[in-house]
Image: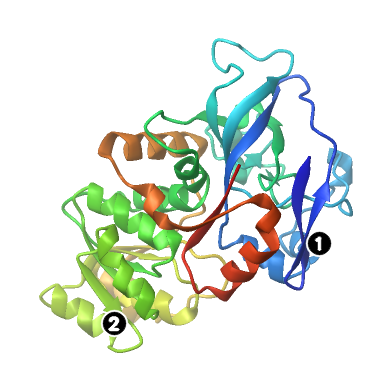
Amino acid sequence: MRGVVFKGDRKLEIMTFPDPAPGPGEAVIEMKASGMCGSDLHFYRHNPAEIIRSLGFKDLASRGIDENAPIIGGHEPCGVIAALGAGVDRNTFRIGDRVMVFHYEGCKHCDSCRTGWTQLCDHGAIVHGLIAHGGHADYMKVPVSSLVHLPQEMSFAGGAAVSCGTGTAYGALLRLDISARDTLAVFGLGPVGLSAAQLAAAMGVEVIGVDISAERVSRAKDFGVAHAIDGSKVDVVCEILRLTGGKGVSCAMECAGGEVPRQQAVRCTRPWGKIALVAIGGNLSVDAMKDVIGKQRTIIGSYTFSEVGMKDCAHFIANHGVDVDKLFTDQWRLDQADEAYRRFDSQSGGKGVFVF
């Protein structure tokens, strides 16, 4: 089979791998869609081995993982079960079932794994697309415990979005405990930010969207954003205060990365406001008393979502008719991977997906 391997330094290679066979408790998924996530660009731009070391992954050899072996990228997989190993309950999963893949593997026994938060595994999670083969391939082998049924109302591309970016947005909304009583400011109108806007609007929330890209700002209202702000042209905090009668929003979500939008996300909330930090990397620098303690604000770190949350997100989308497919501006074949990632790296378009 074919698989895309990130080499770093903005290089990748489409390599040939043996077709996988499922072991006990495993499934082989025939890929139908594999989304391109912003975090993939870290592995595309930089040496994946260095990233693995910087993230603190240790003792991989003892877990049967060769750090030097080429790893297939992509962690937004969605497809059809092509084969099942021994010991799999055929009443739960059958060959031909449409499924999404939760892209973390853990020990299955610690409290985090047992509650579906596998990425927080006490023994360290295995992340598909980074230290285990991902979805940018014809087939993918995973534990059956990683599978979530895809609702019939959703496309495979939509399922791929839920497998990371859109699911991450939903997880952050749950962490904010948001409801129709709230107003939400979303900083960064890329795929995760637009997903947050779509989902929050479907919950009845008034959404304010912020970005410094005029193109992204212009798209935002198609995703449920009531007020779209170009942060390159106005004082964002002042504009949000104006829109909210001087009070500020009750909730903010930071999906952009960078110190400035994080500061703005904190400072645009009213007293007792809640801020979810979603974007990976960077720092938060605010005045502890003036910006947080004195305003009774709560700052929340939100790291993707649980396996149960992934299922709930998909069913919320299906039940509320959320057009998550609208996130995708580019569809690619796997043999176009080099062109696809060069375009994605330019950040000139929206979200891309490989379709099979």
Q: Quadrant of the C terminus?
A: top right
Residue 225, numbered circle: none
Kind of residue indicated by mark 2: Val
> 176 or 28, which is in the foreground?
28
Residue 300 can be seen in this image: no
Regarding residue 129, the answer to whether it shows in the image is yes
Which residue lies at the image location 52% right of the left edge and 49% below the top edge?
164
Q: Earlier in the sequence, mark 2 or mark 1?
A: 1
Picture colour scheme: rainbow
Dot 2: what SS?
Answer: helix
Classify residue 104 by image quadrant.
top right
Quadrant for residue 122, please give it.
top right
**Along the viewing direction, whichever of 112 and 30 lies nearer the viewer:** 30
> At 70% from the left edge and 52% from the top edge, which residue is drawn?
73
Residue under numbered circle 2: 236
Quadrant in the picture for the N terminus = top right
The secondary element bearing badge 1 is classed as: helix
Q: Is residue 136 above or below residue 279?
A: above
Query: Residue 136's spot in the image, x, y percent?
Result: 67, 48
Residue at 48% across / 40% down in the picture?
159
Residue 227, given in percent of the width and then of the height, sits at 21, 70
Nearer the observer, 301 or 89: 89
Q: Position of residue 129 (x, y in %)?
A: 69, 50
- Residue 230 vs 221, above or below: the answer is below
Q: Residues within 10 Å of mark 1 (few under 14, many from 20)?
A: some
Tell me the crowding category of disc 2: few under 14, some 14 to 19, or many 20 or more residues within 10 angstroms, Cα based: many
Indicate the amino acid at tag 1: Ala
Q: Is residue 143 left or right of residue 219?
A: right
Q: Residue at x 61, y 32 (%)?
A: 146
Query: Position of 198 compared to 15: left or right?
Result: left
Q: Which mark is on residue 49? A: 1
Rounded to the nearest angstrom, the CA distance separating label 2 from label 1 is: 38 Å
